[in-house]
Amino acid sequence: MTPLLTVEDLRVSFPTQTGTVDAVRGVSFTLGRERLGIVGESGSGKSQTGRAIMGLTPSQAEVRAKKLLFGDMDLLAMPPKERRLLRGKRLAMILQDPKYSLNPVMTIGRQIVETLKTHERISSKDARTRVLQMLEAVQINDPKRVFDLYPHEVSGGMGQRAMIAMMLVCGPDLLIADEPTSALDVTVQLEVLAILDKLVSERGMGLIFVSHDLRLVSTFCDRVLVMYAGRVVEELSSAALEQAHHPYTQGLLNCLPRIGSHRHPLPVLERQKEWAE
Amino acid sequence: MTAALSIRDMLVMYEDFAALNRVSLDVNFGESFGIVGESGSGKSTLLRATTGLASFQSGSLTVNGRSYSGRKRDKEFYRTVQMVFQDPYGSLHPRQTVDRLLLEPLTIHGFDNVDARIARALDEVGLGSGFRFRYSHQLSGGQRQRIAIARALIVEPKILLLDEPTSALDASIQAEILNLLEQARRDRNLTFVMVSHDLGVISHMCERLTVMKSGEAVETVPVEALEKRQLSAEYTRQLMVASEGFRRD
């Protein structure tokens, strides 16, 4: 069976005044219909990996890969027009902060209808029904009311649910979630994750969950890639998190303060040059 | 024993919305006190009303034996109390060098020997004199937060108010900043009031904590109660569960 996504030796580099910055330096993995976590600190290249798969890398940057296949389609060889048809329809992405990633001058309902109409021939009436169902699926209690609200009129948790609804309304095969809950309060975070988890498993989607929070990712995903300086330094199954071998992963786990453990001072991460090589 | 910081029935209203609804708390000298809650719970408002960045309409505030009201604070107050903010990108003047940033509080409070003090302050936060003539945009997030801490410590305060000092930082940088704060507290015998949404951070740094929700203090417990899970408020228990990560039922 062909995997949903094949990434081989993915590289993303940005030209700058002081030379080229290699944000992603040879990332490889394959993804089936499963939940994959990508974890790393800021600057590790985790978000750029997600964006390169979506085709949302800024135009000045260069994306290269030996293989970047979605099913058996070559994403890099594809003309931009075809890729645009995939995006939103079969590949979707949830961004970090609903405050900045929803259109502020369009009601929530209208922007979800827009997604649907871009990709499907559907009457306005049917589109409205589909959107209301979708809003219900993300556990918004009063979908009819929320349909007509503007993004600034809803809370962060509600906004993030609306974004999930927008991304899932066309029934994508692959969902990339880039820090989907980092802007939310901890208790709301779990509600949103539970909704995401339910929809992903019900619909049999593949999910790439990008986050800086190793513990959260490991409780949510089946498999975790740990990135450092643009490379994958370790791949772990979530259950085996405690058996991480790479000193970077161990360091990341160790430096978190935990309830009930008294370590003063906290162990800090001593970065080694060879990790980046 | 007199409290370092004592707040009684503090009320902060924004039009008809009570951001802080009659909250009381006492922080002893040398103690590290935590405030936990979600966004909108009033935890930052409490710190802002204490420092005079927001006005409180009723209640009382006593700091180091002196009473304050409204939003007027005297120089003595700022010698005693300093604050470190959440976002190190927004809390340093973008057009001032580190030297200038650190000089300003010294000038305001009439310190002598400014040169040596600035050098020592940079040393204390682990940056060294190489950073003295840089601008904040030339520094990483962790380095900026170190500068913000140096700026707070340079006037030798007794009480440090910390508003989510590490939530904008990576986990590994967070550990470094927390260690730095603990070291400073030990060396200078400081009193901390630390706001965070992260129970792990609070339990690491503090001896007692107050849990806040919708502008009210839900409960105040010693940090051991977190470890033993002896919590009376349902909301605190929810926070505990949430801090343990995602669970599939």
Image (spheres, rainbow, N blue to C red):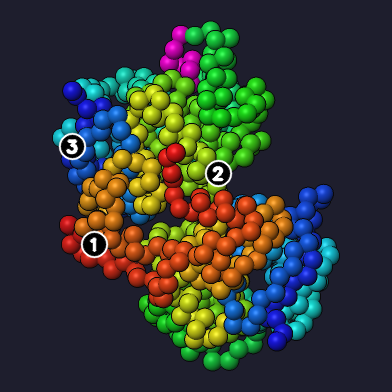
Q: Which mark is residue A270?
A: none
First in sequence, mark 1 or 3: give its number: 3
- Whether residue A26 is visible, yes or no, is yes
In the figure, is residue B145 to the left or right of A106? left
How far is disc 1 from disc 3 in space, using C-alphas? 25 Å
Magenta span dominant secondary structure: helix
Vertical side of B23 occupied by A139: above or below: above
Q: Depth check: give the residue in front, A250 or A94.
A: A250
Please give the chain letter of the residue carrying mark 3.
A
Q: Which residues are magenta?
A: A115-121
Residue B44 position by quadrant: bottom right
Q: Nearer the viewer, mark 1 or mark 3?
A: 1
User: In the image, is residue A119 part of the stretch drawn in magenta?
Assistant: yes
Q: Residue at x 48, y 58 (%)?
A: B168
Residue A191 coordinates in the image, percent (x, y): 52, 40
Picture coordinates of residue B122 (x, y %)?
45, 80
Residue A247 has which mark?
1
For the N terminus of chain B, the quadrant is bottom right
Is the residue at mark 1 from the same chain as the one at mark 3? yes
Q: Nearer the viewer, mark 2 or mark 3?
A: 2
Residue A62: image quadrant is top left
Q: What is the spatial separation of the Cα atoms under label 2 and label 1, in whole angstroms?
A: 32 Å
Protein chain holding label 1: A
Horizontal placement of B8 versus A71: left or right? right
List the residue tagged with mark 2.
A188
Residue drawn where x is 80% and y is 71% of the image: B60
| Mark 2: secondary structure | helix
For the residue pair A245 and B151, the one nearer the viewer reads as: A245
Q: Are marks 2 and 1 on the same chain?
A: yes
- Host chain of mark 2: A
Circle 3 sits on which residue?
A8
Query: For the residue marked with disc 3, what is the amino acid?
Result: Glu
